[in-house]
Amino acid sequence: MSLANSTNATIRRANPEALKGLQIHEIHPVKFGGSATDLLNKTFLTQPQHSAYTNYWNSLMRNIKK
């Protein structure tokens, strides 16, 4: 399990009710140099928000690789 995933699992276990229905995502993705463990680099998103956020960063990464 990646460091980001294990950190997010720890956050979720500590706050199950507060995070119900939310997904944890890094504001500055680890792939772009963001911290996998810094709580200030975490945001809590609904599934549709998380999908849009992930699509944005994946698109950016594809464009950079061109």
Image: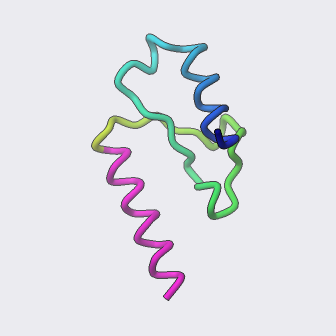
47 sits to left or right of 26? left
Residue 7 x/y as whole percent? 66, 32
Residue 41: x and y, percent? 63, 43
Colouring scheme, one of rainbow, by chain, secondary structure, one colour? rainbow
Q: Residue furthest left?
A: 48
On screen, residue 6 above or below 36: above
Q: Which residues are magenta?
A: 49-66
- Residue 17, quarter of the rendered image: top left
Q: Which quarter of the figure has residue 1?
A: top right
Residue visible at 50% across and 72% down in the picture: 61
Instruction: Decide whether residue 35 is among the magenta residues.
Output: no
Residue farthest toward the top in the current orientation of the protein: 17
Residue depicted at 59% across the width and 26% down the height: 9
Q: Position of residue 45 (x, y in %)?
A: 40, 37
Location of residue 32 in the rendering, given as x and y in whole percent from the top left corner: 63, 64
Q: Relative to 5, say whether 56 is above or below.
A: below
User: Which residue is situated farthest in the front direction here?
Assistant: 1
Reply above or below: 33 against 9: below
Q: Main secondary structure of the magenta part?
A: helix
Q: What count of labels does the image hold?
A: 0
Q: In the rendered structure, does residue 55 fall within the stretch colored magenta?
A: yes
Q: Is residue 60 above or below residue 5?
A: below
At 70% across and 41% down in the image, what residue appears?
Answer: 3
At 41% from the left edge and 55% from the top edge, which residue is drawn?
54
